[in-house]
Amino acid sequence: MANLRLLLPILSLLLLSSGASAAGAAHEAHVSAVVAEKGLDFAKEVLIGEAVRSLTPLRLPGVEKAVRVPFLGAIRVAASNITLFHLDVGNDSVIHPGDSALVVVASGISANLSMAWSYYYDSWLFPIEISDRGTASILVQGMEVGITMQIKNSNGSLALSVLQCGCNVKDLVISLDGGASWFYQGLINAFEDHIRAAVEKAIPENIIDATSKLDSLLQSLPRSVNLDNVSALNMTFVHDPQYGNSSIEFDINGLFSSAIAKISNLQKHPQLSLSCGGASKMLLLSLDEAVFNSALEVYFKAGSMHWVVDKIPDQSLLNTASWKFIIPRLYWSYPNDAMLLNISMASSPVMKITSEKIGATINADMIIDVLHGKETIPVACISVVVSASGVAEAAGNKVYGKIELDDFSLALKWSKIGNFHMSLIQGVIRVFLNTVCMPYLNSRLGHGVILPVVHGFTLKDVYVLTSAEQLTLCSDVTFANASSLAES
């Protein structure tokens, strides 16, 4: 079973299945992932390597049969403990998508087997039984193994099945050791057809059995991914995979929702181009801007977008004395009192992705609180609408961002200290946004967002592209050692 678990992450690379959910949003995709030709070749090499490890050692059924020898009659010969203990798959292997399935063919495979042999003969012509025994080594050359796998959507998950699987052995040589092996070589060659048939039968059976268990494991994967106690990521697969000439595309709902609420439906389906700025990459992952906006909405509704500012680079600005000549009534009412800025979102922030940039509109309410004695007194509320733009970068399995201020507008929503013109405080607010708010946001974006990549794999040399309403990551992939996967 441990060897089967090793195969799961490899197959998951093709399926991009860090999870799947069976919730109601099963008809809309906001994340598309394409495994390109280079990625398929990488997956093929890893998949074949793990398949070899799972198939060795492989015990084959023994056989006992009668061989007729001139003048002597029938001699009973037997082969037992037939074990395939080594497989060598060369570079002559291919993987390509069909119209609705994935075909993997490995040619030029050599294999080594061992077995025990024995024979006995008794007859009325001889008063005693004649017998001998020993071991044999078997060399298989020119073996070809092919498998056609179908991946289909099953209620939001991916179902894996084998349409065809076959094995063909071209050459097989049996070399005996022990006993009078040179004398019995002709007798033991009688096992050649049996061993050939056993190999051609056992390898496909084991591959099909492993695939069936992998399918069960895929179906048992978590059907939603809780990122924290606020948000969950909908990993429902949408439609069947789309097979291109040299790639496979998987569409995933990909929207964020409340960790305790049902996922809502949105009508949107991204189309992912295989273009990656001319770069040849293994994996292309496209995130629709609706993914980011759904995440922002979830955290907004959960009340997580709230910030109390009590320290800034110029701390004197958080004292009413600094506003004596700008907002005189503030100082007269609360002379030389400390202040707080209580900032909360008035609505969910909105991201807009274009080919030129990633933009964001932030609509916040900034309440000015005065610390008067032991009381905290709200004295005014200013509506601040910020337009910002930024860039996204990726390293490893994380996406990082950096944002800068484009423009902003101010409006007084209410005041207990009289009306005052926004133009009077615009310069101070600009400094506050550039020296406090933007650095704060960039510190959060600098922590990075972990991508839902299958355990054991790491994205490498990630290239980030933006287009209308989409962020696309083009990446190569590195694979961890098998032992770490077995322990996961």
Image: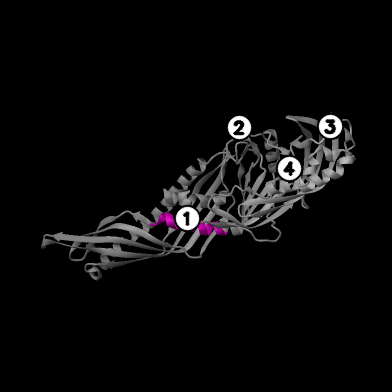
- Res. 419 image quadrant: top right
- Closest to the camera, between mark 2 and mark 3, is 3
User: Alpha-carbon neighbours of circle 2 within 10 Å: few (<14), some, or many (≥20)?
Assistant: few
Q: CA distance from mark 3 to mark 4?
A: 24 Å
Q: CA distance from mark 1 to mark 2?
A: 36 Å
Taking 232 as reference, is 58 left or right?
left
**Image position, residue 430 (x, y; %):** 83, 45
Q: Residue at x 88, y 35 (%)?
A: 328
User: Do the CB atoms of the residues marked 2 and 3 lie less than 8 Å apart?
Assistant: no
- Closest to the camera, between mark 3 and mark 4, is 4
Taking 175 as reference, is 427 left or right?
right
User: Alpha-carbon neighbours of circle 1 within 10 Å: few (<14), some, or many (≥20)?
Assistant: some
**Image position, residue 168 (x, y; %):** 43, 59
As drawn, the residue found furthest toward the left would be 127
User: Do the CB atoms of the residues marked 3 and 4 lie less than 8 Å apart?
Assistant: no
Q: Residue at x 34, y 54 (%)?
A: 59
Residue denoted by label 4: 311
Q: CA distance from mark 4 to mark 1?
A: 50 Å
Residue denoted by label 1: 482
Residues shaded magenta:
41-56
Residue denoted by label 2: 260
Residue denoted by label 3: 413
Label 2 element class: loop
Q: Residue at x 56, y 51 (%)?
A: 14
Q: Amino acid at mark 1?
A: Ala
Q: Amino acid at mark 3?
A: Lys
Q: Amino acid at mark 4?
A: Lys
Label 3 element class: strand
- Closest to the camera, between mark 4 and mark 1, is 4
Task: Let me know if residue 44 is in the magenta part.
Answer: yes
Q: Earlier in the sequence, mark 2 or mark 4?
A: 2
- Closest to the camera, between mark 1 and mark 3, is 3
